[in-house]
């Protein structure tokens, strides 16, 4: 992994669509070299976000009352809500570095952070013909979702770690294009999780301050 220091922004609950507007501004600033590489840590009110490849049959029943919002990131359907730590990464890639290369680095940094917190975790390679296994896993369960893109060599979107929130909404739709996926959280794996500790640990692993 590269030695890559990031500037840290921290917020609590931010509406998803408002966050997308601010993220677009941060990306523009990074493309213009008026902002350093940045990690923005926050959470969202309950919302499903869907990528371009999300199938209609994977969407939740509207009667559940959780909004469904299209997004420009890679990947398929994911859920955001209180008790989940979201990290948006606005990073300028190197001349020989692609977004997939950086996603691998993100996975490894999150594996390291979870290890510090006491959750043994791993990244996975995707077998040919299978749904993408991008993210971080523990004991066969998925604990981190990752979806990113790059424009003019600057990344956007990022990761979502299930810390101590309600996992029920994951069961109301098909997450990550995988009907059989078992989504878990740090609290489920360890019995409890302190959100502030998780946030500080993740920031440290990304060299963000």
Image (tube, rainbow, N blue to C red):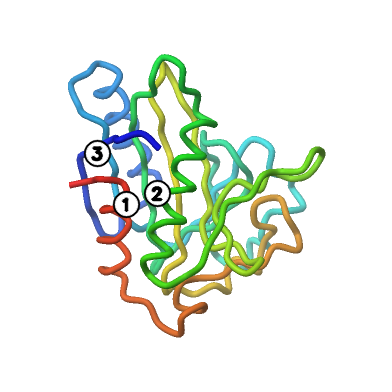
Left or right? Give the position of 17 relative to 13.
right
Q: Residue at x 31, y 70 (%)?
A: 195
Q: CA distance from mark 3 to mark 2?
A: 22 Å
User: Which of pointers 1 and 3 lies earlier in the amino acid sequence?
Assistant: 3
Q: CA distance from mark 1 to mark 3?
A: 10 Å
Q: CA distance from mark 1 to mark 2?
A: 25 Å
Helix, strand or loop for disc 3 = loop
Residue 123 in the image: state x and y as whole percent.
57, 51
Q: Is residue 54 above or below residue 137?
A: above
Picture quadrant where residue 42 is located:
bottom left
- Quarter of the figure with the N terminus: top left
For the residue carrying disc 3, how many other residues have a C-alpha within 10 Å: few (<14), some (14-19), or many (20+)? Answer: many
For the residue carrying disc 2, how many other residues have a C-alpha within 10 Å: few (<14), some (14-19), or many (20+)? Answer: many
Residue 44 in the image: state x and y as whole percent.
38, 57
Q: Residue at x 51, y 31 (%)?
A: 101
- Residue pointed to by mark 3: 6
Give the number of the mark in front: 3 or 2: 3
Q: Nearer the viewer, residue 85 or 189?
A: 189
User: Which of pointers 3 and 2 lies earlier in the amino acid sequence?
Assistant: 3
- Residue pointed to by mark 1: 205
Helix, strand or loop for disc 1 = helix
Residue 17 in the image: state x and y as whole percent.
39, 44
The mark found on residue 56 in the picture is none
- Residue pointed to by mark 2: 16
Q: Residue at x 73, y 55 (%)?
A: 178
Residue 185 in the image: state x and y as whole percent.
50, 71
Left or right? Give the position of 115 relative to 174.
left
């Amino acid at each position: 992994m590269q030695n890559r220091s990031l500037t840290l922004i921290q917020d609590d609950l931010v509406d998803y669509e408002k966050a997308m507007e601010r993220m677009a501004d941060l990306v523009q600033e990074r493309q213009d070299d008026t902002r350093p590489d940045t990690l923005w840590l926050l959470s969202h009110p309950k919302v499903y976000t869907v990528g371009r490849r999300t199938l209609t049959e994977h969407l939740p029943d509207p009667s559940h009352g959780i909004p469904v919002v299209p997004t420009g990131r890679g990947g398929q359907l994911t859920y955001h809500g209180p008790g989940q730590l979201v990290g948006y990464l606005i990073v300028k890639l190197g001349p020989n570095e692609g977004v997939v290369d950086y996603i691998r680095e993100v996975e490894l940094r999150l594996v390291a952070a979870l290890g510090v917190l006491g959750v043994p975790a791993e990244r996975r390679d995707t077998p040919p013909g299978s749904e993408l296994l991008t993210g971080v896993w523990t004991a066969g369960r998925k604990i981190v979702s990752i979806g990113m893109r790059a424009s003019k060599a600057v990344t956007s979107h990022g990761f979502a770690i299930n810390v101590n929130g309600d996992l029920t909404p994951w069961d109301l739709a098909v997450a990550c294009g995988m009907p059989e996926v078992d989504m878990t959280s740090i609290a489920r794996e360890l019995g409890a999780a302190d959100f502030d500790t998780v946030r500080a640990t993740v920031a440290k692993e990304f060299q963000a301050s």
